[in-house]
Structures are given as structure tokens and as C-alpha cells.
Image (cartoon, rainbow, N blue to C red):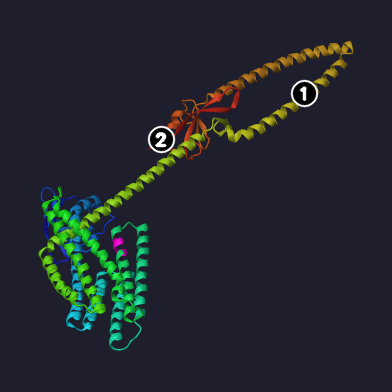
Amino acid sequence: MQILKQIKQDNNPYQIYHIQFPFQQKTKQDPNFTHSMKDLKISSIRIDSGFVLSFLILLRNQDKKFMFEYTSLLYSNFNYYIFNWSYEWSCEVCNDLISSYELQQYRAKSQDNLKSILVMITILSGFCFLYNAYLIFQWDYKITIIYCCVSSFTIMVHRLLKSRSLSQYCCFNIFESLLLISYLLSLVYYIEIEKVNINFISYAQLVLQFLILAVTVLVNRSTSETESQDQSLQIQEILISAFKSISALQLVFISLRITEQITWGWIQTLIIIWFLLGLSFVIFICLLVDILQKCRNQQDGIEEEKKRVIIQGGIWLNLVLFGITILPFSTIFGLALNYDFKFKSLNQYAFGLTIFYYLLQLAYYFKFKQKLIDYLLYYDIAQSNLYVDQQLQQINQNNQQIENRIELKMKRMHKLSISKVPQFMVKLSQTYYKCAQNADSQCMSSKIQHNQLNQKNQFQENDNDNEQSKRFDLLLSSPRQRLEISSSIGQDLTSRNIDKKQLEDQSSIKQEQQNQNSQKLCLVCYEKESNMINMPCGHGGFCKECCEQLLSKSELCYLCRKPVTHSLQIQEVQNRESLVEVIEVLEQQNK
């Protein structure tokens, strides 16, 4: 797989790739991908002796899903045949394309970010220029008001066009832009026409900004719990919302000062601005120290070209923070000095500094535009890789926790199963056994009943013997009866001897049957002795080899077809016909 040719077209929404890959006919449709011809165009087809198919693919540069819309055409016998390619093939084809496509996406994002920063600097520089001109050259203040209204409206329209759907953030942006424009227009009405209460608009702006901050925090929190997103983007959204909320609070102070609801000086009124500018100045100092260290250190392990990109990008970033910090500070602090002490010299320096800074920023931008794009691209890729590493680390931790839980659960189940193995089993039938603990009550009741029956039979036999002895004594009183009794006794003795022999024969037969039952063969193979019991069902009559096969394959009892967790090997207990002893446990084998 090789990308032979790539043609970049800035004005064309398609990116052209020339791909060469081994041709393999696959007819199995892959449900994970859509097959369409609307985004695939064939410019040339050739098949050589190695069955290599080459053609040009035009892919949309909007969404990654178009990377996976593929269809192959084979010209044979003057007909076009359409084949679907397997998932493995599509992954191999798209690996290089995805990397190139993602690189272009990152580059486009870096260009947009660079343009957005330049627009922000332009708006800020324009505001400082117009306001300093108003204080120095007495320009009409309404020019600055109109400039702020147009800038706010332009930003609102840009955000609406950039967003693909009308989300809650778009609605919030519309409301905050409309409130800001309404406040600026009401300020003109307050100064030029009538003294009306303009504080309620600043109050509404403050409530809206804190509402946006609360919604942003809640949405990002719920999103982080359900979906894995980049935490840095969430932090940026929260910081921007917090900055807007603090700025809205500063707007309330300014409104109260204009309407003379408070009698503070302008330096005290603008205390929130001093705090924000001081924080920005601290960040500027930190970045300046960082870029000086990078310029001083050799940075081993980094390519020379990348070193230059990092240094030039760091210098530009410090210039941006310098403009965001110094220009507003000099302008607004000069405004406070002018209103409180009628001191205008600082605004003159601020006016010249604004012009010089903006020209320097434009020159640096156009001279190192490609380097700045590469710098932002390097930052985005590093941030993306860090995010991917964090996600992989989180997935590995979750998998490790799941494995530990499963292992702990298996150990507990193993210990539990071993602890529940009985020491003795009661034989209820030839193929069914029960735990001795469960059958204790039944055995005790049966023993009691058996003892009661034996005692009753013994009492009856004793009574019969006593009656017969009395009758015998009466019969011996006459000689004739003695002769008759002696003859009858002889016959009786002979009959008793015969009965005794029959009883001995029956007992021997029973003993042989018991020996046969004790040596009963396995119900499965009929070759080996049955000395195993399947648990927990309790069915027996199997040999050890058959139970081992059962636990390793089907894991279902041969008789009841219920799951078998382990098997017990037993042996008979002397002088106890129905009681057997457990001598070994066979458990399931890991597959």
C-alpha cells in the first residue's frame, strides 16, 4: 500500500489521492461501512499481471466517514462488475489516508485558530486606537460605540455560521451580543437624549453570564461522566465563561458609576479590570521566561527545524499576550487618570504604542505565517496525543480493575466451593446421593422409627414365648401327650432346620447382591468402578475418567442434564451401608 501521488487544491473541497493496492475479489458485504459512488470517482483503471488495480479516489475534506465509502470496479468482458471489499482490506487502504487526512484537518484547524487570534488582536487594537483618539483628538465617542456594536454583531454572526446546529451555546451567544449592543445604544441615549435607568441591562447581562457559566460547568461535568472528551477543551470553555462573568460584573460597576449610583473614582471602579490585566501580565512573564529558556537551551533530541518553529511560535505568543495586556492597560489607565486627574499624556503614548504594535503584529504574521501554523499544529497534535494517552491509560486501568475483580471473585468462589464440600454423603439410591448434613434429620427420624419397631417386635416375641411355654407345661402332665409331643417336636425340629438352611441361603444371596452392588460398573462406560458423584445435583454411578471428561467438555450431568460445578470421589464406610466418605474433589478445568 503506497500513496503515489497527492494533489493539494485549496479551492477544491476534495483531496485527490492516487492509490495502488493488490486486487482481491471479495463478495461478502461489510455492515460497518456504507458503499456509495457519490464520493468516489474513477479516473483510470488498469490491471497488470500481478492483479494490481490503480485508480484515483476523491474524498471530501469534511467528515471522516467519507474515508470509508469505497467501491471497486473491474472492467471485464466489456462490463463493469462492482465488488465489495472486506473490512481488513479497507483498513489497510485507509491507514495512510486517515493519517494524511487527520494532518490536513489539524492544519485547517490551526489556520482557523491563527486567523481568529489575528481578528481578536485587530478588534482590540481598533478599540484602543479609537478610544485614545477620542481622548486626545476629541473624536466623537459614538464612533467607538458603533465600532463595538459592529464588532459584537460580526462575532455573533460568525459563531452562528460556524456552528452546524442551533445549540444552547448559540442561543446564549445571541442573547449576550444583543444585550451588549442594547447597553451601548442605551448609553448613547442616556448621554445624548434623556437620563434613563440603564442599570437593568447590565444586571440582565450579569445574570445571563452566570447562567452560561453554570450551564457550561454542568454540561461539561455530565459529558465527562458519560463520554470521554478532551478535558483541556472543557477547561477552556469554563475559563472563558468565568472571564465573561467577571467582565459582566465590571460592566455593572461602570454602569453604576456612570449613573452616579456610586461615587467611587474611576481607578476604584475599574478594579476588576486591573485584576484581569494583572493576571494576564503574570502569564505573559511566565511565557517570556519559558521562551528565553528555550532559546538558551540546546534542546537535544529535537530537530533543528522544529526548534525554530517552537521559538518563533513562542515569540509570537508573547507578542499576543503583550498586546492583550499592555494595550488595554495603557488605554484604560489613561482614561481613569484623565477622568480623575485630567491627565492625558499616558493616552498619547498608548495611541502610538497601539499603532506600532499592530503593524509589528501584521509584519510578524505575514512573514512567519507558515511557521505559526506549524507551531499551532504541533501544539494540537501534542494535545491530541496526550488526550489519547490519557484515554488509553484510563482504559488500561479499568481493564486491570475488572481483571482484579474477576480474579478476586473467582478466588472467593473457589474457596466457597471448597469450603462447602461435604465430608460424607448419604446413599439414597444406586444413582442418587445427598449430603450427610442435609440427611441427618432424615437419618435420625428413620433410626428412631426403626428402633421403635424392633422393640415392639421383641415384646411380641417374648409374649408368644411365654404363652407357648405355659401350654407346653400343661401338655407334659400325661404320658400319652408326652409321646405325641415328642414326635411333634421331632418334626418341628426337622422343619426348623430346613427353615434355617433356607435363611442362610437367602442371606448368602443377599450378601452376594450387596457385593455386586458395591462393585457396580460405571453407567457411562460400563468398564470401571462407579465411585464419583456429580455436584450439586447429587447423581452418582460414574467413574473418575468419565467425570473428568464431563467437566472438561459438556459440564452437564449425564442423568439430569443440569450444570456440574465439581465431582466428588467416594469410598464406602465400614459397617455403614448407606454412608460413603468423600476422598477427592474434581473441579472444572479452565478453558
Q: Position of residue 511 (x, y in %)?
A: 60, 21
Asked if disc 1 and disc 2 are in contact, CB closer than 8 Å, the reply is no
- Does the magenta portion include 147? no
Q: Amino acid at mark 1?
A: Glu
Q: Is residue 235 magenta?
A: yes
Q: Position of residue 375 (x, y in %)?
A: 17, 59
**Residue indicated by mark 2:** 589
The C terminus: image quadrant: top left
Judge depth for marks 1 and 2 and give the one in front: 2
- Up the image or down, 238 lies above or below 93; here it is below
Residue positioned 42% across, 33% down in the render? 549
Q: Is residue 29 visible?
A: no
Say above or below: 119 vs 574: below
x then y, percent, for residue 89:
21, 51
Q: Which region shows up in magenta?
A: 233-238
Q: Secondary structure at mark 1?
A: helix
Q: Hey, which residue is sitting farthest bottom in the picture? A: 193
Residue 376 occupies which quadrant of the picture?
Answer: bottom left
Front residue of this view, candidates 574 and 365: 365
Q: Quadrant of residue 379?
A: bottom left
Decide: few, some or many residues near mark 2? Use Cα within 10 Å; few <14, some 14-19, many ≥20: few
Residue at disc 2, secondary structure? loop
Residue 475: mark in rendering: none
Residue labelled with disc 1: 461
